[in-house]
Amino acid sequence: MIITDNEGFIIGPMTLKPVNEHDTTILLETFIDFITFSHRIGTAISGSALTLDSGFGAKVNHKFIKEQGLLP
């Protein structure tokens, strides 16, 4: 899974998993890695919008994203 900006540039570390593992199962891990990375490089992401595919629309994902100060 890769997190990109609106221009398609990769802005965080990639999370690699076996091909048979669904993306929704690795979202939280990928997002935590992204938050850690953004803190390390001093990038403020609070208040930013995070747009996800509809497959990630679970309430638990929205709650986690809001808890990190982002807009789902």
Image (cartoon, rainbow, N blue to C red):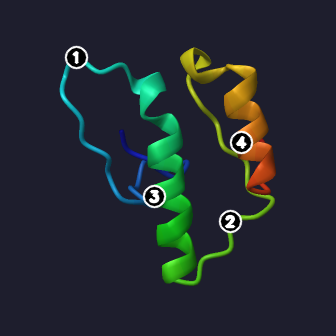
Mark 2 residue type: Ile
Distance of label 3 from label 2 (alpha carbons): 13 Å
Which residue is at 55% across, 48% downward?
6
Say what secondary structure mark 3 lies in. Answer: helix
**Residue found 64% across the figure and 36% down from its top:** 51
* Secondary element at tag 4: helix
- Residue 9 horizontal side relative to residue 65, left or right: left
Question: Badges 2 and 1: C-beta atoms under 8 Å apart?
Answer: no
Is 7 above or below relative to 64?
below
Mark toward the viewer: 2 or 4: 4
Residue in the foreground of this view, choosing between 31 and 9:
31
Q: Earlier in the sequence, mark 4 or mark 1?
A: 1
On screen, residue 51 above or below 5:
above
Marks 2 and 4, how far apart in space?
A: 14 Å
* Distance CA(mark 1)–CA(mark 3): 21 Å
Left or right position of 27 against 46: left
Q: Is residue 66 left or right of residue 27?
A: right
The residue at which mark 4 appears reads as 64
Label 2 sits on a secondary structure element that is loop
| Sequence-first tag of 4 and 3 | 3
Q: Which image quarter: residue 50?
A: top right
Q: Which residue is mark 3?
A: 33
Estimate the x, y position of residue 32 in percent, counting from the top left. 53, 54
> Which amino acid type is shown beneath numbered disc 3?
Asp
Q: CA distance from mark 2 to mark 1?
A: 31 Å
The residue labelled by disc 1 is: 20
Residue 45, which numbered label?
2
Asked if the residue at tag 4 contacts the one at tag 2, i.e. Cβ–Cβ closer than 8 Å, the answer is: no
For badge 1, the amino acid type reads Asn
